[in-house]
Amino acid sequence: MREDTITHVTVTGMASIDGPASLNNNLSTSRARAMAKWLEKNALVPASLITIDSRGEDWSWLRHLVNCDGDIPDREKLLEIMSLPVSSDEKEAEIKSLEDGKTWDYLKAHILPKMRCVEIYVKVKHHTVVSSLPIDMPIEEVIEEEVIEEVIIEEIPEDIIEAEPEPQCEVREIEIKESIPSEWQRNFYIKTDLPYWLMFWSNVAFEIDLAPHWSFNLPIYFSAMNYFRRDLKFRLFAFQPGVRYWIKGENKGVFFEAHYGMGWWNFAFAGEFRYQDHRRRSPALGGGVGAGYRLPISANGRWAMEFGAGVGYYHLYYDRFQNRPNGKYVDSHKKNIFFIDNINVSISYSFPINNKKGGNQ
């Protein structure tokens, strides 16, 4: 900027291939925007000269990095998978299965961090002053030529440290101190189950990621109404906390669950008796297991649908009453039952708690 005139700057964000493609597309755009803001503030580049672009998961850049590294386990098979005409997420799944995960572990350690970068193209007019002039030229002539310079930056900068040129297959890096990479995005979810609303049950569920592959889920259900007649009701207040294990480390896709259940209830089925937990102080107690699947339904991955079911074993201690207004007490019973204790078709919205990778945006 001291010697030349900047005419245009293009900032392109990129992301590594781990994680959902939709999330990585948004992440690469965020990287580019953060870099553009840094250029405006610290390099004093006018915003009017900056164009922001996003390359998302750049598989061509990955291929270049793979070709330059001869130590990658099963590299030839990896290159074949990268050429398959399938989605990015399907390619990622195939790569993870290579060499019992050794190929993927190597990529995570040595290749994928180099993909989490920002690429900057600077277009300038370079000025050269001609000091030795013919006698017939009365003034100095300024010769201008356009030059495009490229800088690849890994991470979003706060302080910039100049780096020496690397070998041809390496990235010229500028160290960024603001961001500390992380391999996992923690989320908090708020959900509601659609089938239970059809039964006029109010319900909400809260879930928080504990670690890669693990989360804690807490659904709560409440109903206090009759089904259009006094002798038909399905009233309850119940909750069902559980721990989930996710096949994928991003805590999406397939999960398995172990849960506990506790509920106070008052049921009547238009028959002779009404059933209620004993003296309203003996809730159903038990627990069980379940499984399900979470599917993102929005471009940013925040909205998702969740499908699942579970079975459980519960102890019941309940009273029977005549099924009519102010019906008399009949008797009490204890029993243990095994049944389907949840069916989920829910919609959820997630709030990120910390950044998954690439540090603070």
Image (tube, grey):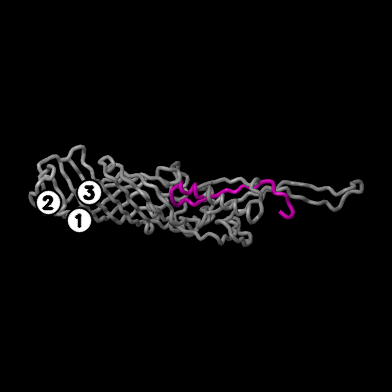
Kindly identify the amino acid type of the residue bearing the numbered disc 3: Leu
Q: Position of residue 260 (x, y in %)?
A: 25, 56
Q: Position of residue 90 (x, y in %)?
A: 41, 46
Residue 230 appears in the picture as rendered = yes
Q: Are marks 3 and 2 in contact (CB under 8 Å)?
A: no
Q: State the residue in front, 320 or 259.
A: 320
Q: Secondary structure at mark 1?
A: strand
Binning the other alpha carbons within 10 Å of mark 3 as few (below 14), some (14 to 19) or many (20 upward) gives many
Q: Position of residue 278 (x, y in %)?
A: 14, 54
Binning the other alpha carbons within 10 Å of mark 1 as few (below 14), some (14 to 19) or many (20 upward) gives some
2 or 1: tag closer to the N-terminus: 1
Q: Residue at x 19, y 42 (%)?
A: 233
Number of dots carrying numbers: 3
In this rendering, would 205 be left or right of 56?
Answer: left
Binning the other alpha carbons within 10 Å of mark 2 as few (below 14), some (14 to 19) or many (20 upward) gives many
Kindly identify the amino acid type of the residue bearing the numbered disc 1: Leu
Q: Position of residue 189 (x, y in %)?
A: 38, 51
Q: Residue at x 45, y 46 (%)?
A: 300
Q: Secondary structure at mark 3?
A: strand
Q: Which residue is mark 1?
A: 285
Specify start and end residues of the magenta stretch as a single range: 1-27
In this rendering, is residue 348 above or below 162?
above
Q: Which residue is mark 3?
A: 236
3 or 2: tag closer to the N-terminus: 3
In this rendering, would 323 be left or right of 145?
Answer: left
Q: Which mark is residue 244?
A: none
